[in-house]
Image (cartoon, rainbow, N blue to C red):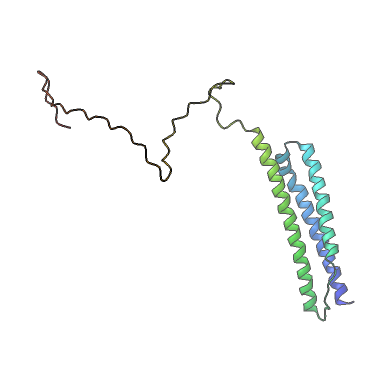
Amino acid sequence: MDLKLGTYLIYLAVSIVLTVWVARTLLKNGQVFLDEAFADERLAKSVNHLLVVGFYLLNLGYVAVALKIGQALPDGSSAMEALAWKLGLVLLVLGGLHFFNLFVLSRFRRRRLLDQLPPPVPPTRMIPAGYPPYPTPPMPPRPAPHGYPKPTAPAAPAAPAMPQQPVPGAEPQPPL
């Protein structure tokens, strides 16, 4: 038997076995995750089966498209290298599809859980419609544009300092 044909047969056998094993594992163990994500067991079971069918179609389709080995295989070591390369790509596709599914389903779950949460802080009172807005503080004066004289405020007259007279019967206060 030709080395290339043997490599093809081994590649197909191992790829199909890996695909079936991963799909069964996902079908069995993914059901709990989907039940939690969708909060509806019947919907979760249906989605689980649809995901497994899509998984089979995508992965076995990739295995079929990636079957061809472009170079000649003169010896067993080059056949093993080609087989390892092909199987490695299949495993990467399997892992990528798995993590993509987990990402999408975790988004569904998080969205469902956020919809069930109460508001972060319950309101203490309601503002009636048409209520005037809060008063805004006065704006500080804007500086004069360059080249214009600055506005001067009239100077307030200074109050004369009055000496403090001691109050009869009171304790003397220390100076400030």
Of all residues shown, which one is farthest toward the top?
Answer: 169
- Nearer to me, 128 or 33: 128
Quadrant in the picture for residue 118: top right
Q: Which residue sits at x=64%, y=36%?
A: 114
Q: Which residue sits at x=82%, y=76%?
A: 71
Q: Is the C terminus in the top left, top right, bottom left or bottom right quadrant?
A: top left
Question: Percent from the top left, x then y, of residue 28?
Answer: 76, 48
Q: How many marks?
A: 0
Of all residues shown, which one is farthest toward the front?
Answer: 148
Quadrant in the picture for residue 142: top left
Q: Which residue sits at x=78%, y=77%?
A: 78
Question: Percent from the top left, x then y, of residue 1?
Answer: 90, 76
Would residue 155 appear left or right of 145 to someone viewing this image?
Answer: left
Quadrant in the picture for residue 69: bottom right
Question: Percent from the top left, x then y, of residue 138?
Answer: 44, 30
Question: Percent from the top left, x then y, of residue 74?
Answer: 82, 81
- Nearer to me, 155 or 6: 155
Of all residues shown, which one is farthest toward the right?
Answer: 1
Height in image: 85 above or below 139?
A: below
- Nearer to me, 41 or 174: 174
Would residue 163 appear left or right of 16 to someone viewing this image?
Answer: left
Would residue 88 appear left or right of 66 to someone viewing this image?
Answer: left
